[in-house]
Amino acid sequence: MAFFGQSLLLSFLQNENDDYAKTPDAILLLLGIPSAVVYLVSSALTLFLNSGTLPYAVAENFCIILLLPFFFSGLQRVIGLFLLAPKGGRMFFLIFFLALCCCLSVGAVELLALYAAFDTVFAPIRRKLFKARFSSDNKRDD
């Protein structure tokens, strides 16, 4: 309940143009890179390993344990993207997300968990590339 309350408050503040609510620091539930890597690797191992082996059982247990936190993190990120989208783009975003949920072999829970895990791993890389590009653009202007 605390997660949904915080998500609703964050959504309300984003609609009121609060600058802090639009930053990634405002997200309450953030999972670390090691847990995201463990989740992604264990998800891949469950696809490729034989179901009667011990590594498969360990990987499946890691997937089950980390599925719910990554689902909530992905849900929070999708709600934030939906609310920050322009008014005309919200319907397109909603239809695109529902189409992905219906057409993929995984369910919406797994889709949101995978999205959050990939975003957790690649967000620092994108941030570092953005800072490098921004600093090089400022040097050219001088």
Image: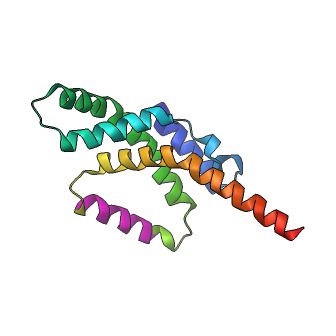
Question: Residue furthest toward the right?
Answer: 142
Q: Is residue 97 magenta?
A: yes
Please provide percent x and percent y for residue 103. 23, 63
Magenta stretch in the rendered image: 91-102
Q: In the displayed structure, would residue 89 be above or below residue 60?
A: below
Is residue 51 rendered to the left or right of residue 39?
left
Please provide percent x and percent y for residue 6. 54, 38
Which quadrant of the view contains residue 16?
A: bottom right
Please provide percent x and percent y for residue 72. 41, 40
Please provide percent x and percent y for residue 139. 84, 63
Q: In the displayed structure, would residue 27 be above or below residue 126?
A: above
Residue drawn at x 51%, y 49% is: 122
The residue nearer to you, when weighing 12 against 67, is 67
State the quadrant of the N terminus: top left
Q: In the displayed structure, would residue 78 be above or below residue 52?
A: below
**Visible in this render: residue 43?**
yes
The residue nearer to you, when weighing 41 against 62, is 41
